[in-house]
Image: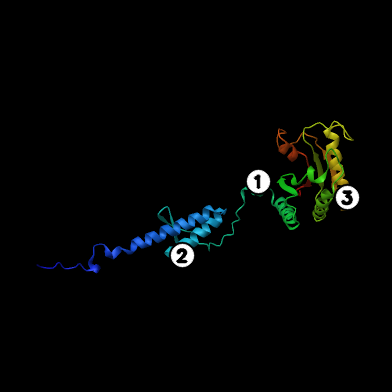
């Protein structure tokens, strides 16, 4: 009886490309790991592109990336351009005059350095920069007397204003609930009283020049949100310290 010869392992069909299976599995695992990391993070498009480029360079030797199974080229980083990426919330600011944007950036930097991010809200339009301070920080209920916390915030704001030369308008705003008792018979008087209290504090305590200061009360008639909930009413009860922008010429 003849014996069957054993086939040589090196002569098996397809053995020459068996490494592709291992390589494909490795790529799948790396892609899965990368997607998992991405899903757990909150990154910008710019950072995502940089991470994808770095990963592709490590895997296939640079210059190209893999997106949905298709190899695509990446642009060279050394293009010599310095284009600024503007966050979505700052797109409107970016459309303002360059001189006003410079003031806006100075205000933002001051707020960040003095830990005021949770005390004030900074916005801007062609008329100037608005430092929005909630009445909950500045005053008690139905009162125009500045609280201890309010004085602390206004002390920092006064330092900011003394670094600028612009005129400053103090705007008082209320919600739509009638002020039926106390010193102020209507929301008009209450909003004006609060604006004047802030103006006097900035002048008398922080020495902001009186020639730069003015006050106005809008009552309930310029709300930020509909007065249909306590949360919205709280937003509408505020004092805006407006750094007025007056373009030269």
Q: CA distance from mark 1 to mark 2?
A: 39 Å
Residue 92: numbered disc: 1
Q: Secondary structure at mark 3?
A: helix
Q: Quadrant of the N terminus?
A: bottom left
Q: CA distance from mark 1 to mark 3?
A: 32 Å
Badge 2 is on which residue? 58
Mark 1 or 2, which is nearer the eye? 2
Label 1 Cα neighbours within 10 Å, binned few <14 / some 14-19 / many ≥20: some
Badge 3 is on which residue? 203
Q: Looking at the image, is 71 positioned above or below residue 175?
A: below
Mark 2 or 3, which is nearer the eye? 2
In x, y percent, where is residue 118? 73, 50
Question: In this image, 141 relative to 225: left or right?
Answer: right
Mark 1 or 3, which is nearer the eye? 3
Residue 47 seen in render: yes
Between discs 2 and 3, the one toward the N terminus: 2
Question: In this image, 129 relative to 158: left or right?
Answer: left
Foreground of the two, 88 or 81: 88
Question: In this image, 87 relative to 239: left or right?
Answer: left
In x, y percent, where is residue 80? 56, 62
Foreground of the two, 206 or 17: 17
Q: CA distance from mark 2 to mark 3?
A: 61 Å
Between discs 1 and 3, the one toward the N terminus: 1
């Amino acid at each position: 009886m003849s014996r069957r010869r054993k086939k040589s392992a090196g002569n098996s069909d397809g053995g020459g490309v068996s490494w592709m299976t291992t390589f494909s599995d490795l790529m799948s695992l790396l892609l899965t790991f990368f997607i998992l990391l991405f899903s757990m993070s909150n990154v910008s498009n710019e950072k995502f592109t940089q991470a994808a480029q770095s990963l592709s360079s490590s895997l296939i030797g640079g210059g190209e990336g893999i997106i949905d199974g298709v190899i695509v080229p990446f642009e060279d980083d050394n293009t010599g351009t310095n284009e600024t990426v503007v966050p979505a919330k700052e797109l409107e600011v970016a459309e303002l005059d360059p001189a006003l944007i410079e003031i806006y950036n100075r205000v933002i930097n001051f707020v960040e350095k003095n830990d005021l991010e949770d005390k004030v809200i900074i916005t801007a339009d062609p008329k100037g920069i608005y430092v929005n301070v909630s009445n909950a920080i500045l005053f008690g209920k139905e009162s125009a007397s500045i609280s201890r916390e309010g004085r602390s915030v206004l002390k920092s704001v006064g330092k900011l204003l003394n670094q600028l030369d612009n005129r400053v308008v103090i705007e008082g705003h209320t919600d739509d609930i009638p002020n039926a008792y106390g010193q102020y018979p209507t929301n008009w008087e209450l909003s004006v009283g609060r604006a004047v209290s802030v103006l006097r504090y900035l002048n008398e305590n922080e020495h902001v020049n009186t020639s730069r200061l003015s006050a106005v009360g809008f009552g309930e008639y310029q709300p930020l949100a509909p007065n249909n909930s306590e949360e919205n009413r709280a937003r509408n009860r505020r004092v805006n310290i407006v750094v007025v922008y007056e373009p030269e010429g």
